[in-house]
Structure formats: C-alpha cells, structure tokens
Image (cartoon, coloured by chain):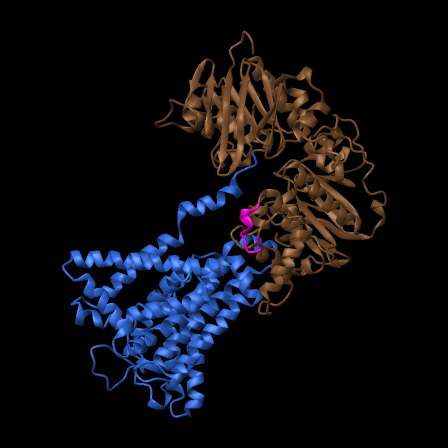
C-alpha cells in the first residue's frame, strides 16, 4: 500500500514538473505564468462554485478512467475509451428516443443500460480481434474512436437529427426534462451515486476478486497464467467489456445529465484524458479517484484561462499533452525495465 | 607455466554485479595449444569468467594478457583481434541465416555485394576441414543441435582464432555428440588452438582436459593443475566445497557428473515398489499438430504409474517441449488420447486437468513459471484462484498468510509476500513454483528441467521434493537433459527421439545404451 501511495505521489510530482514546464513555455510565449497558475487554481478550486464545476467534469472522467484501468491492468492497451464513450451516449439516446413517453423510472435505467451495452459492444470487437487473431488493440481501438466520431456525425445529421435545430453543430433532439438526471450544472445525487457505485464496484473487482489478481498476472505475464490453466480469452474479453461498458456509462451520464442531447463531436478529449488519468494513477483505483479530481479541476479551469490569463482555452490541451508526455516517460522507463529483467536473464555464471 | 608464455592469462580479476561478487581475485594462466577445463557448479562464476576472457564483461578489477601483451578489458573487438573467440552456451547465430551466411557474418574484411554461390564456395573448405559436411544452404534453425554447435565452432574459427572458449558445450549434446565434439576439439588442439572449456561434469573433464581449474563461489579453488594430479573424489570436493554429509553419496556423484563412464550407477534409493501402482497417466499414440513451437509429437505413447518417477532423456529439440505442452492441453492433438487418473482428458482444458491433479513445473521458470514483476503471493495463489470462478471473492490478507506459511514450509528465503518474484534467486524462485505446484491433491507432477541453472543445494532440494511426491503416491514425469540427474532419481527412463518415445530403460542404467538410443544409433 505504501508503495502505491508513493507511486501516485511520484506521478503527481511529474505532473507538477509538466505544469512548471508549461509555465515556462507560456511565459516565453508572452503570457503570464503566475497568472496562468492562479487562474487554474481559481477555476479548479477557489472561485465560487469551482469545486462543483470540478466535480462535474471529474465524475464522468472517473468512471471512464476506472474502465480504462481494468483493461490496462489486464495488459490490453485499450485506448478506445473515446469511441466507447460516444457509443454510450448514442445507446442512451436511442433508448430515450425509442421509449419516449414512458415513465422515467423505466426510461432512465434502460437508457443507462443501453449506453453501457453500446460502450461494451464498441470494446468487444477490438477485444475479439485481439484475442482471436492477435490484432493490435491499440490500432483497432484508435480506429474505433474515429469510426464512433463519424457515426456520431452521421446520426446527429441524419436519423437522430433535431428537425428544429438551427445551431452551427448538428445535434439530436433534447432529452425530455423528465428523463434528465442532472441539469447542465452536471452534479446531482444520481450522478454522484452512480460514480460512487462505480468506484466501489471497480475497487472490489480489482482488489477483492479472483479476477483482479488473475487479470493483473495476465497483464504482467500472460504466458505464466496460461500455464496455470487460465483462459486468456475470457479474462481479456471480460476486461474489454467492463472497460467499454464503463466508458459507455460515462457517455450515458453525460447525455442524460449535463449535455441533455447528442451533439456531434462533443467532449472530444474525454476518453484520452481518462487514459491519462489511469496512467497517472498508476492503475490504482483509489489513485484514479484522486487524479480524476485533479483533471476535473483542470477541465473546469479551462473556462477561466481566457478570462484571467488571456490564454486560449486550448492551453489546457497543451498542459494535458505535457502531462501525458511526462507520464509516458515515467510509465515506460525503458532502461529501468531492462534492468528489472537483468537478474532473471543473466544466466548462471 | 615456467619457460612457456601463457596463451591467455587473467591477473587478479574481480567482477561484481551490484552487490553480488561473481568473481573475486581470480588469477589464471593457460598454456598454449592445450585443452583446459574450468569447472564449478552453477553460480560459481564460470560463465562470467569466460565472458571476461572474451571481452564481453568488463571486470571491476584486474587485467587480461594474451601472450605477453595486455589486452584492453571489456572490449569484444580487442579480444577478437587478439584471437580470442567464445562459443556461447545458448547458441548465438541468427536462426534465419544459412550456414554460409553465418560464416560470412563472423568474418572480417568481408562486405559489399556477394552471391549465395560465392559465399558457399568460400566457406565449403573451411567447414570441411572442421568435419562439418552439410549443405551450406541449410538455415541455422533447421540444423540438428550437434551440427548447429559445430557451425558455431566453425564460425568462431573463421578469423583464425588462437584461443577458443566454449561455455558448457556439452549441455545440449547426447553422449555420442559429446564424443564427436571432443574429437573435434582434440583435432583443433593438435593444430595449435588453445581451448578453454567451461564444464561442470567431472566425467567429461577427466575425459578431455589437460589442465583443470576449479571455481567455487567466484573464487579460484584449483588453478590449472594437470589432470594427472587430481582424481574424481578430490575434484568433487573442490567443486562442492564442504565434504557434504547432508547430500547422499549417489546424489553427490550425480550432482557433479562423477558417475564413472558406462558403469551402472548405484540405484539403491530408487523406489523398490515402482511398477506396482495403477497408472495415473496414459498417453497413447499422440500426434500433435505442427505449430511452429517445436517438433511435433508423432505417435508418442507413455504410461506413468502411481509412485514412480519416469525420466525423459533425449537431445534437446526432439519433442520434449511439445510433450509437456500436450500434457498441459496447450498443443493441438491430431490423434491419440491422454488419460489422467483413468479419465480421458484429451478434450479437457488445462484448468480441468489441473483440477484432476495435474501439476506442472514448466521449462522456463521466468516466463512460464512465474510473473517476475508480480508479487509472490499473487504468483503463489494463481493455481488456487483458477480453481474457482472468476468473480469469486478473495481475501488478500488470508492469501498472503497462507502464502507466507507455504513458502516458509518450502524454505524459500524471502522478506515479504508482497515482493516481486523477480527479486528472488533462481533456486528460491524454483522453490516458490514447487510450493505452488506440489500439494496434497497432486496426482501427476511434470517437472521440466527443474534443476537447470540451480546450485547444488537447490538441486538437491528439488530432487528431495520430487522423491517425496513419489513416496506420497504421485506419478512424476521428469524431463532433463542431464543424464546423471535422471539416472540418480528416475525409476524408469524413456528416451525421446524425433517426437516419439523411442526406448525405455530401467535401473541399473547403461550410459552407453541410453546415449545410443538418444541418437537413434542401432544398439
């Protein structure tokens, strides 16, 4: 446990270094770094309602990141959370459209379940390709993201198009107020409950079930676990499905909650931020909870940056990218990985 | 060495890997044109010594001299230029190269454009002179192990090497292959090449070497003494160290490969009631589908009874890996059947076979046996957890306690059940696997090269564990390339050749007969 805390702290140290680096870059570009940090702190924590806004962004991220964590721990680099998230929103929309008029007590659970199924299906085919033919899941899930994005464009400008819509972006009809689980503020008891439930269940899955231990072994050494009699296919496919279902859940929550309608190309960075969160958290569930709050804060702050520091909101993307760079450098320290193997590889003299 | 310039001399060489001293203060000189042996048990520093001589390992202290000239240490090119070549224990030629290409690969001063035919013309003579008479177009991976080694030696000699170092060259060979190798080495020695052999079997050392040096725990125990001045018993003591009362005489002989030639090995401790038990395992006429992971089985049949240890001998690459994979249900079967405890398990997955009492100590403990970056308790619990359902709840603290108790019982040296398995030494890692695989419910234990790379204490421990399993009524299948090991602990030895069980022997074993069966020579 101590080791885990230490590794999360180390990851956060890298985040601080990345932020400092961004500060230097922005300073050189003629912006004020102190003002930037202040506006991030304001936007994330200190301004009125800042915590509420941070939470609004943190909760869906937490859910998706929990899913990413499950597949990463099992050794599958499912980077398709973005597409699975979209499919979740699409699934929920389809359910809402199909059941329009039915009581909310029926529609909301069905829409959420439909979103989870949508996300799971979008993770299932790369999972199947990987397990059946060894197709690299990084490629297929990444392609899946593009496909899902295009599917979203097609649906919002075709079958699910809001006929009365006049906006610049295409969107579906708004979800009826009775089916919404939150206003555009995005924090409601239902969403908090769903988030907490996800957190607890994934923690239990990872730390208190045979699946948790076995999938972690499979992630670190699939050969060994096969010699123990495990079926990699079922372990891996379950990991993909759980991972996709959780991203889908986040998509359904965004749709029934703060978004209220399917908008073409909404939240384009959600899945990638979730991948980042899982990595910064060192694939620990408690770590994901903490780190999600941090990234939720960054997302909330992106609205403050233009106002206070005069920086474009895209500066947050730059910051996220810098963090990603440092985290990948930390997660795959090649020399260290080689050193770790040395005692094993070194033949007996 | 008086009056004679040493071909190769190490002066006060020490090598440290982190906190481990692999060699401490070794000073050795080898006279030119003779055959020298450097012996010691696993972990004694033999391979490190060979690598220092070949410039592959930079010693922390000490120097290297070739002739009268000091050679820069830790530089392969410098050592090569001075005429030192090393033939590795695990062969190093690119498997996809043809013989001719791999010769060219090792040669200096070549380069540019060439044709296949020109290459073959260039190297035919060289290979013929070394007694390698094979089509030069054959790819390295398709060669039988003896030829492959011969090609490795030929590759080492393309640059007119003065000193040839061979690291454990006999480990992969059949007895007949060893004889051929030794002939070849004597021929080279007569041509003036100085040969340094890293070996660990006393029988082989006494057979070929002119001088013997012994390493133990990184220290030089005996320095290049003439073979006439030492006998097997003294050599065994030098290698093992303590005149060990803890290890029985027959085991000790097996450990150092001291069993004399073709003489029958003492077999007193082989179980007397061996063939009495009912069969725990029956394999009949098994053909496996070729899958590119080793030679397929072709009509392999084998029966193991309760309470017996069946040894599998054979030159590596004759289907031993596939045999274990077939027993584990990890190789596709074309034909034949496999029964475990009277039940036909041919169609069963490994999980079901394990539930029926199958236990496996796999060939490669670092990849097939353990997940090195995972915690000990996770490694240890894997087998148990797989018996239940995926979503069944677990209590990590209880598993860790159980793991702690079990590892203590198996005498594993560890600090905490949360430490990664990769932090253990080879012997301790193997004991973790034993602790996981050998339990009261085991009915058939498959041990694939369970002692490879282990020191003498750990090897004796593994043997004890296998014997205890047998005495409890388990069937044990021991696959080993070490005939001394098989003869010492197996109740029966079968020989694998070309994917089938080619012959069967029972104690007392005849080394010559088993060796002949390994190469398929008519007996």
Q: Residue at x 45, y 44 (%)?
A: A339
Q: Is residue B417 magenta?
A: yes
**Magenta stretch in the rendered image:** B416-424
Q: Where is residue A152 drawn, in percent x and y? A: 32, 74
In the picture, the quarter occupied by the C terminus of chain A is top right
| Residue B522 position in % (x across, y down) | 74, 29
Query: Which residue lies at the image location 70% right of the left edge and 43% below the top edge?
Result: B461
Q: Nearer the viewer, residue A101 or B139?
A: A101
Most extreme residue toward the left is A30
Above or below: residue A284 compared with residue B14 = below
The single residue placed furthest to the top in the displayed view is: B3
Report which colour depicts chain B: brown
Image coords of residue B109 (percent x, y): 37, 22
Q: Main secondary structure of the magenta part?
A: loop
Foreground: A110 or A199? A199
Q: Residue at x 34, y 75 (%)?
A: A55
Residue A221 in view, yes or no: yes
Q: Nearer the viewer, residue B116 or B193?
A: B193
Q: Is residue B53 magenta?
A: no
Task: Specify the quadrant of the image occupied by residue B172.
Answer: top right
Q: Is residue A229 visible?
A: no
Q: Is residue A112 left or right of residue B480?
A: left
Q: For this view, does B268 lie left or right of residue A276?
A: right
Q: Say which colour chain A has.
A: blue
Picture quarter containing residue B39? top right
């Amino acid at each position: 446990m101590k080791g885990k805390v230490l590794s999360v702290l180390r990851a956060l140290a890298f985040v601080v270094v990345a932020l400092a680096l961004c500060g230097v870059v922005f300073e050189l570009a003629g912006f004020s770094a102190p003002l930037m940090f202040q506006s991030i702190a304001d936007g994330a924590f200190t301004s009125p309602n800042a915590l509420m806004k941070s939470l609004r962004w943190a909760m869906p991220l937490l859910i998706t990141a929990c899913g990413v964590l499950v597949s990463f721990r099992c050794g599958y680099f499912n980077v398709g959370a973005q597409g699975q998230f979209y499919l979740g929103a699409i699934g929920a929309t389809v359910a809402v459209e199909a059941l329009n008029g039915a009581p909310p007590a029926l529609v909301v659970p069905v829409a959420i379940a439909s979103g989870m199924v949508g996300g799971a299906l979008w993770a299932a085919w790369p999972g199947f390709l990987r397990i059946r033919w060894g197709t690299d899941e990084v490629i297929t899930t990444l392609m899946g993201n593009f496909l899902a994005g295009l599917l979203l464009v097609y649906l919002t400008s075709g079958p699910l198009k809001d006929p009365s819509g006049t906006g610049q972006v295409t969107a579906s009809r708004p979800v009826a107020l009775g089916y919404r689980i939150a206003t555009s503020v995005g924090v409601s008891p239902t969403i908090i409950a769903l988030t907490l439930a996800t957190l607890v269940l994934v923690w239990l899955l990872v730390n208190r079930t045979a699946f948790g231990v076995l999938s972690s072994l499979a992630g670190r050494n699939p050969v060994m676990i096969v010699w123990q009699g495990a079926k990699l296919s079922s372990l891996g496919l379950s990991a993909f499905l759980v991972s996709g279902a959780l991203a889908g859940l986040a998509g359904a929550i965004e749709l029934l909650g703060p978004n209220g309608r399917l908008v073409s190309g909404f939240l384009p960075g959600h899945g990638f931020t979730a991948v980042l969160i899982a990595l910064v958290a060192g694939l620990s569930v408690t770590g994901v909870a903490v780190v999600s709050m941090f990234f939720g804060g960054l997302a909330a702050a992106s609205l403050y940056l233009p106002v206070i520091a005069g920086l474009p909101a895209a500066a947050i993307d730059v910051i996220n990218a810098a963090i990603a760079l440092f985290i990948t450098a930390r997660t795959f320290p090649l020399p260290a990985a080689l050193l770790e193997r040395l005692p094993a590889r070194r033949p007996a003299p | 060495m008086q009056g004679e310039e040493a071909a190769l001399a190490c002066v006060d060489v020490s090598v440290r890997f982190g906190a481990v001293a692999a060699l401490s203060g070794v000073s050795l000189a080898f006279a030119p044109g003779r055959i020298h042996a450097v012996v010691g048990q696993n972990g004694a520093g033999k391979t490190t010594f060979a690598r220092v001589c070949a410039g592959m390992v930079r010693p922390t202290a000490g120097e290297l001299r070739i002739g009268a000239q000091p050679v820069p240490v830790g530089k392969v090119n410098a050592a090569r230029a001075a005429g030192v070549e090393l033939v590795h224990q695990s062969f190093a030629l690119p498997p996809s190269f043809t013989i001719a290409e791999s010769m060219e690969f090792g040669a200096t001063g070549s380069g540019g454009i060439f044709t296949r035919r020109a290459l073959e013309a260039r190297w035919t003579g060289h290979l013929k002179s070394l007694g390698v008479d094979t089509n030069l177009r054959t790819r390295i991976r398709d060669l039988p192990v003896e030829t492959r080694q011969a090609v490795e030696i030929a590759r080492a000699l393309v640059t007119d090497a003065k000193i040839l170092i061979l690291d454990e060259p006999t480990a992969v060979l059949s007895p007949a292959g060893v004889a051929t190798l030794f002939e070849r080495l004597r021929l080279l020695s007569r041509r003036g090449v100085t040969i340094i052999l890293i070996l660990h079997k006393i029988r082989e050392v006494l057979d070929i070497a002119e001088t013997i040096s012994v390493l133990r725990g990184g220290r030089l125990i005996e320095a290049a003494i003439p073979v006439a001045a030492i006998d097997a018993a003294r050599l065994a003591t030098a290698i093992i160290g303590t005149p060990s009362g803890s290890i029985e005489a027959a085991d000790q002989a097996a450990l150092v490969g001291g069993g004399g030639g073709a003489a029958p090995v003492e077999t007193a401790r082989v179980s007397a009631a061996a063939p009495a038990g009912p069969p725990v395992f029956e394999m009949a006429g098994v053909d496996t589908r070729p899958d590119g992971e080793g030679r397929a089985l072709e009509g392999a049949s084998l029966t193991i009874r309760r309470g017996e240890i069946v040894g599998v001998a054979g030159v590596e690459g004759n289907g031993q890996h596939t045999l274990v994979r077939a027993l584990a249900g990890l190789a596709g079967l074309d034909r034949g059947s496999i029964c475990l405890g009277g039940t036909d398990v041919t169609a069963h997955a490994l999980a079901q076979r394990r539930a029926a009492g199958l236990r496996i100590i796999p060939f490669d403990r670092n990849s097939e046996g353990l997940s090195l970056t995972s915690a000990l308790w996770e490694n240890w619990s894997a087998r148990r957890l797989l018996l239940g359902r995926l979503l069944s709840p677990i209590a990590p603290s209880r598993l860790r306690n159980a793991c702690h108790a079990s590892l203590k019982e198996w005498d594993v040296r560890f600090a905490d059940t949360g430490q990664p398995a990769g932090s253990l030494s080879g012997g301790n890692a193997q004991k973790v696997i034993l602790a996981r695989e050998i339990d009261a419910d085991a009915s058939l234990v498959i041990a694939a090269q369970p002692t490879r790379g282990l020191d003498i204490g750990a090897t004796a421990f593994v043997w004890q564990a296998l014997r205890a399993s047998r005495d409890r009524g388990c069937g044990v299948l021991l696959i080993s390339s070490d005939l001394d090991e098989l003869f010492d602990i197996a109740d029966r030895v079968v020989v694998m050749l070309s994917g089938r069980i080619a012959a069967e022997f029972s104690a007392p074993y005849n080394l010559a007969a088993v060796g002949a069966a390994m190469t398929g020579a008519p007996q």
